[in-house]
Amino acid sequence: MEHADGTRDWSAAAIAKQRVDLSEFERRWKVMRTDRWPVRQMVDYRLVGSAIARVRWELDVNPRWQRDPTFYVEQAIGALQEELMPPLPFGDASSRKIVTRAENIPSILEQGKLNLKAIGPFAQLTIELLADIRARLARVERGVSPLLSTDDQRVRFRIAIDAASRGLVDYREWLKQNLPNMRQDFALGDNAYGFFLHQVALLPYIPEQLLTMARQDFQRVLAMESYEHQRDLRAPELKMAATAEEESARMTRDDATFAAI
């Protein structure tokens, strides 16, 4: 999935627009007359419905943007990481995107502060995630700046990373300050999981059925382990390979043995 270029916006106005757009996509999808469509076309229809439902899941059913502070770290730092993933060298267009993502970080974090009614364990995880963020971003700046295509972009990136570091440290301290007053318990509930299973994952099962299936698989694994243990009681214990090459050769030999059975 590719995200749109430009800045990411989680302001109240942007979220309201997302809801309006999503409702229109849902309406158009539901009114399609599909009763005479061939199977291959129905598969596409269901997949489009899954994609639309995924947005509803993330926006309203499991709104991490309201509960989970790591969401805004992902939106800020994750967006920058995505732009750094393509192979080198960075062209002018890529360099502009990288600088834009870096400059976008402080505003995303400020929007997060306005949106969040954070859950304590999620906040604690975010605090730990940002423990050494200033040093990590400094390494990013030193590594990325020389690869950008112009001096102006390098200056902007250096300024943006400094602002991002200050913003992320401030975000971490804001979470620490508010941590004692946050809810500690949280559960999505059966209805929410049911929505994901049926509308997004397109599975026919209810959560209880999946738990039963998981228990059956777990018991099957335990039984197979017990059978294998009994079969190998008198066999010599396997020795750990001394080198990667020795392990690779052993795996190749075992594969050939099993293929011949």
Image (cartoon, grey):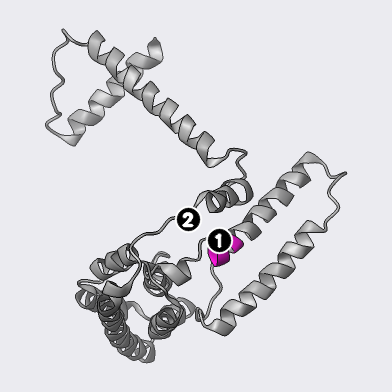
For the residue marked with disc 2, what is the amino acid? Answer: Leu
Question: In the rendering, at what x and y percent does residue 207 appear?
Answer: 52, 41
247 sits to left or right of 10: left
Q: Which residue is mark 1?
A: 61
Residue at x 26%, y 73% (from the top left corner)? 180
For the residue marked with disc 1, what is the amino acid? Answer: Val
The one nearer the camera, 162 or 242, is 162
Q: Which residues are magenta?
A: 56-60
Q: CA distance from mark 1 to mark 2?
A: 8 Å
Q: Which mark is residue 188?
A: 2
Res. 35 visible in picture: yes
Residue at x 37%, y 68% (from the top left corner)? 70
Categorize mark 1 by other alpha carbons within 10 Å: few (<14), some (14-19), many (20+). some
Q: Main secondary structure of the magenta part?
A: helix
Q: Are marks 1 and 2 in contact (CB under 8 Å)?
A: yes
Q: Is residue 24 magenta?
A: no
Quadrant including the C terminus: top left
21 sits to left or right of 240: right
Question: In the rendering, at what x and y percent does residue 201 appear?
Answer: 58, 47
Say above or below: 169 vs 36: below
The one nearer the camera, 260 or 28, is 28
Secondary element under disc 2, as helix, strand or loop, is loop
The one nearer the camera, 169 or 163, is 169
Question: In the rendering, at what x and y percent does residue 233 appear?
Answer: 18, 10
Quadrant including the N terminus: bottom right
Residue at x 43%, y 81% (from the top left corner)? 108
